[in-house]
Image: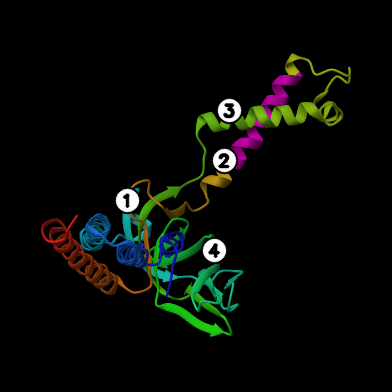
């Protein structure tokens, strides 16, 4: 089966942190060395295999350690910043429908491949949802923004129809969810600066409706808002905004988990231990590939003719 380099790099999927794509890159490097031949080609291929194996080993090891090192927090009492949460995905008021199977879900990723005349599979179309969803634990609820997440799920469907192969990954309502990412609590904005700005905005809106303003506040009916009347206008605006702030303060804060700027953002319905084992297995596999690449590099340098 033949793949182009671009197709192999596109196999990198956030569902497995690019492990499949990096294996494809190694395969491409070996295939190129076989086709081109010669010491230089094999040196280049082995160098690529060493570099990709080492990078993937380090990345998977880092994720496996994070899963064990970052303590699980309760949503209601989680600190702001990088946290680990464990809970259940809540059903949405309006569930998403998966692109291919139309299965009700909260997140999906899909890929459509097409077989050409050479009996090779080529990616025809792919995509994933970006709609937020909610997870909860015994202490509260948290909005999950899946954009940029590395998502591992056991809901995977693959089927073939004629010359097309369809692959779909899903997260479903009521799934157990493990999550690690950037946690932020968004409370009501009732700061003095916000109060002042909102009063100014309200006054500007009232001034634009001069007829209504005169009807409400022109006490002496002279067709103008004089200084004492303007003080009444300002007091009324401040009273209205103060009432809005009081209502906001009574609302519960919104917790949100999203992609950090530098650290991994992981979502999985596999469970804490299963996800850790998956990253550990990938780490060992890529370490073996790195060592094989080092052996090939040494062989190319010492044995092959230039």
Secondary structure found at label 1 = loop
Q: Which residue is painted at 69% across and 32% down in the image?
A: 202
* Mark 3 vs 1, N-terminal side: 3
Is 116 situated left or right of 69 in this image? right
Residue 270 among magenta residues: no
Instruction: Choose between 192 and 129: the one closer to the eye.
Output: 129
* Mark 1 vs 2, N-terminal side: 2
Give the spatial CA distance, label 2 vs label 3: 12 Å
Q: Position of residue 246 (x, y in %)?
A: 56, 43
Q: Residue furthest right?
A: 222
Secondary structure found at label 3 = helix
Q: Which label sits in the foreground, 3 or 1? A: 1
Question: Mark 4 packing: few (<14 Cα in 10 Å), some, or many (20+)?
Answer: some
Where residue 263 is drawn, which disc sits there? 1
Q: Which residue is painted at 70% across and 20% down in the image?
A: 231
Residue 44: quarter of image: bottom left
What residue did someone put label 3 on? 196
Give the spatial CA distance, label 3 vs label 1: 37 Å
Depicted 132 relative to depicted 166: above or below: above
What residue did someone put label 2 on? 245
Magenta span: 229-244
Instruction: Choose between 258 and 230: the one closer to the eye.
Output: 258
Specify the quadrant that holds the C terminus.
bottom left
Where residue 129 is drawn, which disc sits there? 4
């Amino acid at each position: 089966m033949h793949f182009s380099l671009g197709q192999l790099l596109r196999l990198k999927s956030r569902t497995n942190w690019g492990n499949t794509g990096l294996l494809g890159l190694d395969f491409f490097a070996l295939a190129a060395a076989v086709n081109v031949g010669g010491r230089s080609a094999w040196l280049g291929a082995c160098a690529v295999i060493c570099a990709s194996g080492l990078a993937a080993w380090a990345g998977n090891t880092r994720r496996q350690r994070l899963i064990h090192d970052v303590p699980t927090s309760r949503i209601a009492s989680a600190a702001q910043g990088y946290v680990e949460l464990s809970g259940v995905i809540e059903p949405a008021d309006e569930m998403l429908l998966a692109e291919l199977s139309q299965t009700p879900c909260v997140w999906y990723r899909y890929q459509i491949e097409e077989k050409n005349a050479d009996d090779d599979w080529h990616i025809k179309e792919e995509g994933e949802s970006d709609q937020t969803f909610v997870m909860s634990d015994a202490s509260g609820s948290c909005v999950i923004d899946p954009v940029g997440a590395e998502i591992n799920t056991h809901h995977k469907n693959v089927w073939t129809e004629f010359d097309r192969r369809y692959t779909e990954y899903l997260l479903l309502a009521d799934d157990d969810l493990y999550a690690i990412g950037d946690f932020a609590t968004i409370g009501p904005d009732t700061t003095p600066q916000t109060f002042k700005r909102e009063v100014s905005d309200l006054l500007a809106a009232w001034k634009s409706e001069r007829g209504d303003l005169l009807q409400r506040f022109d006490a002496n009916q002279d067709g103008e808002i004089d200084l004492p009347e303007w003080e009444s206008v300002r007091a009324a605006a401040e009273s209205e905004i103060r009432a809005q702030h009081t209502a906001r303060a009574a609302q519960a804060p919104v917790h949100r988990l999203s992609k950090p700027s530098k650290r991994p953002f992981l979502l999985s319905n596999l469970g804490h231990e299963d996800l850790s084992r998956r990253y550990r297995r990938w780490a060992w596999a890529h370490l073996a590939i790195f060592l094989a690449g080092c052996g090939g590099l040494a062989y190319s340098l010492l044995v092959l003719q230039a």
